[in-house]
Image (tube, helix red, strand yellow):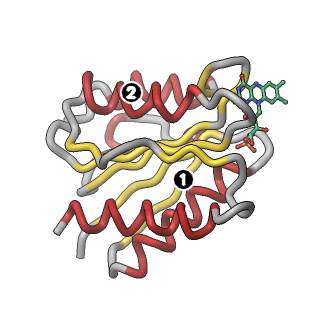
Amino acid sequence: MLKVLIVYATRTGETQKIGEFIAEGLRFSAVDVSLMSANDIKKESDLAGFDAYVFGSATYHGEMMSGMKTLLFLAEKAGLENKVGGAFGAFGWSGEAPDRIFDTMKNIYQMDMVSMPLRLKSGSLGGGIKMAQDYGREIAQKLE
Ligand SMILES: Cc1cc2nc3c(=O)[nH]c(=O)nc-3n(C[C@H](O)[C@H](O)[C@H](O)COP(=O)(O)O)c2cc1C
């Protein structure tokens, strides 16, 4: 069974919610999903053994959260080259974090990224649930 790791950095829980809906979309496609907080990834080996990686952070003061920055440095040496990747995050008005994460996964780790990052104002408003589930499906399709 294909395995996907979703890691989120959140302050008030919206980005975690989006991660949970992406996980649902992946599970509809019979993919095994692990969902973790960035704070719980302590070492490179915690990232080993997955077929795809989806990293998400909320945007605060125009940036991703510090837990996601730490994770991205850790992931640099985790051998993610050519693995399927995606990025997401909740935002209020500018939403820089998902784009920055996506670009790092593409340019530094050389991952095989889905079409674009997923940016949502909320995981449960304005069609957000379906968009996040569909993002999970898109990642699963790229794994086929
Ligand atoms: C102090 C503060 C600063 C924020 N800065 C930004 C920002 O620069 N750009 C943006 O798009 N949203 C900004 N937001 C909005 C958050 O990204 C938004 O509330 C998001 O849903 C929080 O996600 P979380 O629940 O995963 O932490 C800010 C919110 C707060 C409270």
Left or right: 144 with respect to 17?
left
Rendered position, 30 above or below 133: below
At x 25%, y 67%, the residue is 141
Q: Is residue 70 above or below residue 85?
A: above
Q: Does the beta carbon of the residue at mark 2 sit less than 8 Å from ligand 1? A: no
State yes or no: discs 2 and 1 in contact (Cβ < 8 Å): no
| Residue 24 x, y percent position in the rendering | 51, 73
SS class, disc 2:
helix
State the CA–CA distance, disc 2 to disc 1: 15 Å
Sort mark 2 into few (<14), some (14-19) or many (20+) by Cα contacts within 10 Å: some
- The quadrant where ligand 1 appears is top right
Q: Amino acid at mark 1?
A: Met
> Which mark is on residue 74?
2
Front residue of 84 and 45: 84
Give the residue at mark 1: 36
Q: Secondary structure at mark 1?
A: strand
> Which quadrant is the C terminus positioned in?
bottom left
Residue 53, percent from left and from top: 35, 49
Q: Is residue 136 left or right of residue 127?
A: left
- The mark nearer the N terminus, 2 or 1, is 1
Is 57 placed above or below 103 here?
A: below
Residue lying at 63% horizontally and 61% vertically, measured from the top left: 128
| Residue 127 or residue 100, whichever sits in front | 127
Q: Amino acid at mark 2?
A: Leu
**Number of other residues with Cα within 10 Å of mark 1, as a class: few under 14, some 14 to 19, many 20 or more:** some
Q: Is residue 5 left or right of residue 98?
A: left
